[in-house]
Amino acid sequence: MHHESYGSVYKFVTSYDFWNRSGLLRPDAVPLDFIIFPNQVGLKEKEAGRNAFSMNGMRKECSLSSIERQAILTSLFTVRMEVMSTNCNALLRSLRRKRSRSEDEYAKPFFKWAGGKTQLLQEFYFRFPAELQSGGLDRYVEPFIGGGAVFFFVMQLFPGKESVICDANEELVLTYRVVQQDVDALIDILNEYQARYDILEEPGRKEMYLKIRSDLNDQRKRFNFSSYDNSWIERASQLLFLNKTCFNGLFRVNSRGEFNVPFGKYGNPGIVNESNLHKASDLLKNTTILHGDFSCCLEFVTDHTFVYLDPPYRPLNTSSKFTGYSSGGFSDQDQIRLKGFFDGVDSIGAKVMLSNSDPKNEDPTDHFFDELYQQYRIERVLATRMINSDAEKRGTISEIVVMNYQGFKPVI
Ligand SMILES: C[S@@+](CC[C@H](N)C(=O)[O-])C[C@H]1O[C@@H](n2cnc3c(N)ncnc32)[C@H](O)[C@@H]1O
């Protein structure tokens, strides 16, 4: 075993044969030749000539070989890591073993979206169905696409699948369709916005923001979201511009569906990322993009499909200020309806994974999801709640993951 410092991810390259010969592998272990520790877990490089390492809340200092041994003996992959890596590109590169490639190799979400799952990708990776790895699943369906962190991850880690994505938010769906169909024209307009923005100073930038926001809201009243034409390209560019320059990259609308997030005052917001938009466009070429309720995805599910469900959070408490991605909201009745969808997908023979906030974070006696999904496998993973714009209220909370399969567990 040797180790290398790798961006924000530490990578331990091990040899399956070595472990196999050691006699310590469990019978169901699969070949896997690396283990990734996010460095935030507590592993510090060469601290006083030794490695600091924390596991199960206990801080340990030990030499690398002891860590190695500890990893084998305690089934490291099943240990909950305290803070997940948020470096999606580094994670993808590590998992695909493409170490020499540049930071920008992979497409990443182009729309910043509340509830984005980038920080949980590593936890999800260990819970994906084994058939994703073996090639037994040829379709990926994501009915609540949001910013698409999981979509981009899955489609690039396990390429060659056709995919179906959906969202109830028509502005978001419009943007995906423009990136899919007219990325060059979109980039041209964004470049114009970028040039105009760059030469402005305060308060000119804020005025430009407010003008584009009010154009977006005025045009909404007569905008035709049901048939694609050139006006979609202009609207997608307005949305992406606002997403990059608004406060906290939030997408929030009022009861009339008007975008009402204030200006963000960022020094250099990077309005256009051409290469990422091109890569995202390529990835979306083989994707069916739907607008509507999650239920419209069922007809696309086959017994060779992996479905990932990430519905809006069940509010952690009644004072939660985040009112939703659309004026509609997602009630407990919708969560129950979604359970029916989950059952439907299960009965088709597809693999399905769902994530949601854990109501036990606030109220340990709230068994809503445990009861709703009691016949399925339920696990809890740790996340940093990002949705609250009040930094003081961000903290580590648990998220629920529900699966209808046993899954890919690279157990040592
Ligand atoms: C938690 S977010 C998904 C975040 C996404 N996984 C990501 O990484 O960015 C939930 C999404 O569900 C959408 N949504 C709300 N109600 C819906 C419904 N009934 N059917 C489909 N999508 C819905 C929202 O617009 C939002 O984009």
Image (cartoon, rainbow, N blue to C red):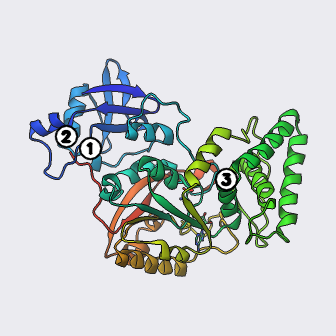
Residue 119 vs residue 392, the one in the foreground = 119
Tag 2: amino acid: Ile
* 44 w.r.t. 252: above or below: above
Distance from label 1 to label 2 (Cα)?
A: 7 Å
The residue located at (82%, 43%) in the rendering is 193
Q: Is residue 189 left or right of residue 115?
A: right
The residue located at (15%, 33%) in the rendering is 18
The residue located at (69%, 49%) in the rendering is 183
Distance from label 2 to label 3 (Cα)?
A: 45 Å
The answer to whether mark 1 and mark 2 are in CB contact below 8 A is yes
Tag 1: amino acid: Leu
Rendered-image quadrant of the C terminus: top left
Residue 6 vs residue 100, the one in the foreground = 100
The residue located at (49%, 42%) in the rendering is 88
- N-terminal label among 2 and 3: 2
Percent position of residue 279, x then y: 59, 44
- Total numbered circles: 3
Under circle 2, the secondary element is helix
Under circle 1, the secondary element is helix
Task: Give the class, few, some or many, for how many residues have Cα within 10 Å of label 3's Cα (few <14, many ≥20).
Answer: many
**Residue underneath mark 1:** 76
Give me the disc on residue 361: none
* 229 w.r.t. 83: above or below: below
Under circle 3, the secondary element is helix
**Residue underneath mark 3:** 179
Q: Quadrant of residue 381?
A: bottom left
Q: Is residue 25 visible?
A: yes
* 223 w.r.t. 7: above or below: below
Percent position of residue 13, x then y: 29, 31
